[in-house]
Amino acid sequence: MIEQLVAAVFTLLPTNSLAEIRHSPPGLTVDLQYTSSNNITGEPLYPKNSKALGDKRLIAALKQAEAILEAQGYGITILDAWRPKEATRKLWNKAVELGLTNYYAPPQIGSSHNLGAAVDIGLHSLKEPQKLLDMPMKFDQTDARLRNNSPEAKKNESILTSAMLAAGFIRHPLECWHFSYPPCEKPKLQP
């Protein structure tokens, strides 16, 4: 199933179509999670000063979703966007070790993140853009037993998902934070 999703997502780019996803609070904030060691590898995957990058078409669609959410009093926090292949390799190697391969792309196939064709995001209130709202699962959470089934988390998930789908994104079936922007041709990623 994951391989089908990955293949379906790969329609976008040559990588020269990448641009910065600009921090424009309160509606859009950037907090790249892989600049810290708080991930399955236990080490930072990106330098602290990394910028969120995405395909220009993804960024345009993200602005549409941002406008939909702002009208409702919400904003988007970018948790991950374009991902270097080396980071994909490190995540995959640890996922294999931990038996979590449903959540990570094998480096020989690549991830939609490697193309700038996906974003991992959270939802925040425009009144408190630095505070993520509860969702059923936290970013990169893989243990369904820890799922937050509160009405508030489900409501937030619905708000975020509705806005992203309206802007043309596809949500990953296992991750409430991961949205890809199709249509794509399967890329030729190098191992």
Image: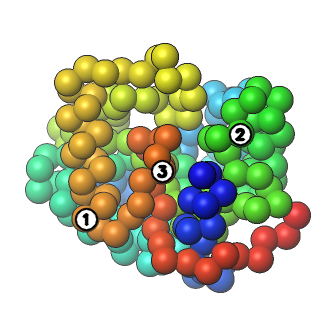
Relative to residue 21, is residue 45 drawn left or right?
A: right
Crowding at dot 3, Cα within 10 Å, few <14 / some 14-19 / many 20+, comes out as some
**Which of 147/114 is in front?**
147
Q: Residue at x 83, y 39 (%)?
A: 93
Count of numbered labels shown in the rendering: 3
Residue 82 in sight? no
Position in image of residue 5 (x %, y %): 57, 59
Q: Residue at x 33, y 54 (%)?
A: 28
Q: Which residue is mark 3?
A: 172
In this picture, is 98 found above or below 162? Answer: above
Q: Which residue is mark 2?
A: 101
Give the amino acid at mark 1. Answer: Ala
Crowding at dot 1, Cα within 10 Å, few <14 / some 14-19 / many 20+, comes out as few
Position in image of residue 145 (x %, y %): 49, 16
**Which of 46/147 is in front?**
147
Residue 185 falls in image quadrant: bottom right
Q: Secondary structure at mark 1?
A: helix
Q: Which residue is mark 1?
A: 166
Position in image of residue 134 (x %, y %): 32, 28
Q: Are marks 2 and 1 in contact (CB under 8 Å)?
A: no
Q: How is the image coloured?
A: rainbow
Position in image of residue 20 (x %, y %): 51, 67
Give the amino acid at mark 2. Answer: Thr
Could you give the CA–CA distance between mark 1 and mark 3, rounded to whole angstroms? 15 Å
In this picture, is 133 found above or below 159? Answer: above
Q: Secondary structure at mark 2?
A: loop
Crowding at dot 2, Cα within 10 Å, few <14 / some 14-19 / many 20+, comes out as some
Q: Are marks 1 and 3 in contact (CB under 8 Å)?
A: no
